[in-house]
Image: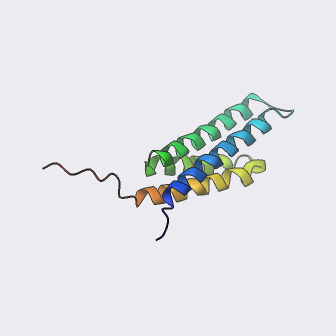
Amino acid sequence: MVPEIRPLVRGLTVAATAALLAVLGYYLVQPGGTWSRLALFAAIGGAAVAGAAGAVSRRPLVAAGGACGLFLLGFWQAALWMFVFPAAGLLIVAALLGATDDGPTAPVAG
């Protein structure tokens, strides 16, 4: 019997998103912070939270959208690449697994 991997990937996605938000919070309070950095970090954090919410709620398009947002916004901050890209990769894996999910087993009417 192979254990189900989808809950594990969803849990890792939430953990990676929480770690990314912690790193963003750490870098935000460092000296030299500007309003543009705050706006960029808010956009990166919003994309990560949206993607994780899509992964947890089994909406693969939302998770893929969050991953694309992380990839696009992550290129602007080279110091965060080692944190942003693994989180985006986990969101892509969660989106792919969510797309292959059979969904609920409710009977079809009619």
Q: Is residue 36 above or below residue 92?
A: above
In the rendered structure, the answer to whether residue 54 lies left or right of residue 103 reads right
- Which residue is the extreme one toward the right? 31
Q: In this view, does 2 lie above or below 52?
A: below
Q: Which colour scheme is used?
A: rainbow
Q: In this view, does 12 lie above or below 5?
A: above
| Between 91 and 15, the one nearer to me in the picture | 15
In x, y percent, where is residue 48? 59, 43
- Which residue is the extreme one toward the bottom? 1
- Which residue is the extreme one toward the top? 35
Q: Name which quarter of the figure residue 41 lies in.
A: top right
Residue at position x 74%, y 48% in the image:
80
- Which residue is the extreme one toward the front? 1
Q: Name which quarter of the figure residue 85 lies in.
A: bottom right
In x, y percent, where is residue 72? 61, 49
| Between 25 and 15, the one nearer to me in the picture | 15
Q: In this view, does 93 lie above or below 23?
A: below
In the rendered structure, the answer to whether residue 106 lies left or right of residue 78 reads left
In x, y percent, where is residue 43? 62, 37
Residue at position x 68%, y 50% in the image:
84
Residue at position x 74%, y 46% in the image:
77
In x, y percent, where is residue 2? 48, 69
